[in-house]
Amino acid sequence: MSAADLHVPVSMEPVAEAAAVQVTRRDARPRRAARTGVSGVLSVPVPSTPAASTPASSTSAPGPIARFLGGLFPCDPRGRLITIYKGTHFAIPNSFGFFIQQVTGTGTFTANTVYDLKDEDQFDWNKFTGIAFTPLEPDRDSAMVGWRYNLVSREFEIAPFYNVDKVRILPKNPAEVISVPADETFEFLVDYTGVTLTYGDKTIFKPYPEGLVPNVWTAARVSGWFGGNEVAPRTVSYYLKLT
């Protein structure tokens, strides 16, 4: 340690004689402080220990391998991770099934489900799940859960969605739509009477429209689908749990 490292604060109180101070040097001998009218006190700075840095939390979306494995082997209590990759319509993995009489379960959207199409197609309804009675053409005769992201409220919206001979039966008023925040879980039931959706203390039920006739022999479970007119502008994912 050099002399430059020593900080010597000065007290102006008079003393008869300063106490002896020993400074260890390679060739130094103990010396007495000189007689003076002020006292000298050596202050040796103590190096401080730097605080450990806390790693920043990551908010990035799961990678493609994690999404793939999460879909095949669900271990999350929210269910299976469903992914729609950028530039596509279809969901992976699919939820297809035959002779379906009802589809019931829960769904959870997250920050990774948010999207912005930057045009009027933002109001189009995506397909979450449901029952199609023309499995080779799910958009011909089907009863489904529709969903979309509202850029104004920054919440997701769910609603009953029907197709009758290729004609879309969309929600007619706000009473048929439920807003769901990210990371919140909603319940759904699609059977041969209609579509029931529940979140919190709100439940809506919409019966089958005229012309849609259930047929168990052709009934198939509908997998997720993005759109609408446009493909996914980014890779989006959500959780689906069938019960």
Image: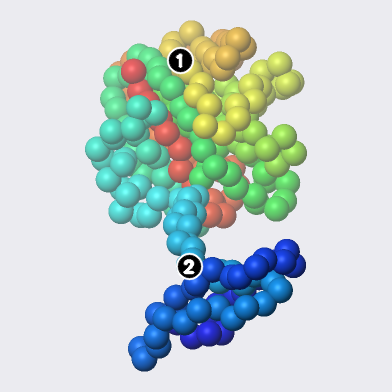
Residue type of the residue flagged with mark 2 = Pro
Q: Quadrant of the C terminus?
A: top left
Residue 2 can be seen, yes or no: yes
Outermost residue, front side: 16
Q: Which residue is mark 1?
A: 189
Is disc 1 placed on a helix, strand or loop?
strand
Q: Nearer the viewer, mark 2 or mark 1?
A: 2
Is disc 2 placed on a helix, strand or loop?
loop
Q: Position of residue 41 (x, y in %)?
A: 59, 69
Q: Residue at x 65, y 51 (%)?
A: 117
Residue 235 can be seen, yes or no: no
Residue type of the residue flagged with mark 1 = Leu
Q: Which residue is mark 2?
A: 47
Q: Nearer the viewer, residue 45 or 192?
A: 45
Q: CA distance from mark 2 to mark 1?
A: 66 Å
Q: Position of residue 196 (x, y in %)?
A: 53, 13
Q: Which mark is residue 86?
A: none
- The numbered mark, 2 or 1, whose residue comes first in the sequence reads 2
Q: Nearer the viewer, residue 55 or 157?
A: 55
Q: Quadrant of the N terminus?
A: bottom left
